[in-house]
Image (cartoon, helix red, strand yellow):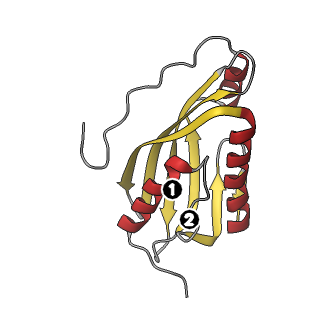
Amino acid sequence: MAAQFSRSQVIEILRQDLPTLFEREISYDIYTPEITFTDPLSTFRGKCSYRLIFWALRFHGRLFFTQIAFEVHDILEERDRTLRVNWTVRGTLRLPWRPKLLFNGDSQYHLNADGLIEAHRDTWDRPPIEILKQFFSTSPAPASPPKPASLNGEN
């Protein structure tokens, strides 16, 4: 029998896990065994593949960056068991000219009837090639747009 989670429990686990995803393992208890992950570059299915994605993020974060952070701005409750997380990734690449990386995105999480996440879809604020161009730039990363209002109703 699958574990059951309330929406508020899932939100709290995401709020705790996501800011440290480049540093430590996240909790996989809130995901179904058949979790589907989609971003602008790829699609993966299954919890084993999902775990590998996060392992690769940590590995490459340590290998290629002197500093990298995943900043959560908001976790919003949307329609039909859907949560949306607004975030920014920023970092300094481990290159002699120390280029800065910055991009914003949204993660949409769809929950099943038991409150487990069955689908995770990421969208980014620019095409992947534009993000990669930052690796070769000698100018600072572009400023991030203002942070959206939080789930707590702050403006």
Q: Secondary structure at mark 1?
A: helix
The residue located at (65%, 51%) in the rendering is: 38
Label 2–label 1 contact, CB within 8 A: yes
Residue 44, horizontal then vertical, whole percent: 72, 57
Q: How many marks?
A: 2
What residue type is disc 2 on?
Ser
Label 1: few (<14), some (14–19) or many (≥20) C-alpha neighbours in 10 Å = some
Label 2: few (<14), some (14–19) or many (≥20) C-alpha neighbours in 10 Å = few
Quadrant of the rendered image containing residue 99: top right
The residue located at (75%, 17%) in the rendering is: 96
Pick the quarter of the image with the N terminus.
bottom right
Quadrant of the rendered image containing residue 66: top right
Measure how far apart labels 2 and 1 are at the Cα level: 7 Å
Q: Is residue 102 above or below residue 52?
A: above
Specify whether 50 is left or right of 148: right
**59 or 11, which lies in front?**
59
What residue type is disc 1 on?
Asp
Residue 87, horizontal then vertical, whole percent: 48, 40
Pick the quarter of the image with the C terminus.
top left
The residue located at (53%, 18%) in the rendering is: 142
**Outermost residue, top direction?**
139
Q: Which residue is mark 2?
A: 27
Specify whether 135 is left or right of 115: right
Q: Which residue is mark 1?
A: 17
Is residue 125 something one can see in this rendering? no
Q: Is residue 70 above or below residue 98?
A: below
The residue located at (48%, 20%) in the rendering is: 143
Q: Secondary structure at mark 2?
A: loop
Residue 134, horizontal then vertical, whole percent: 67, 21
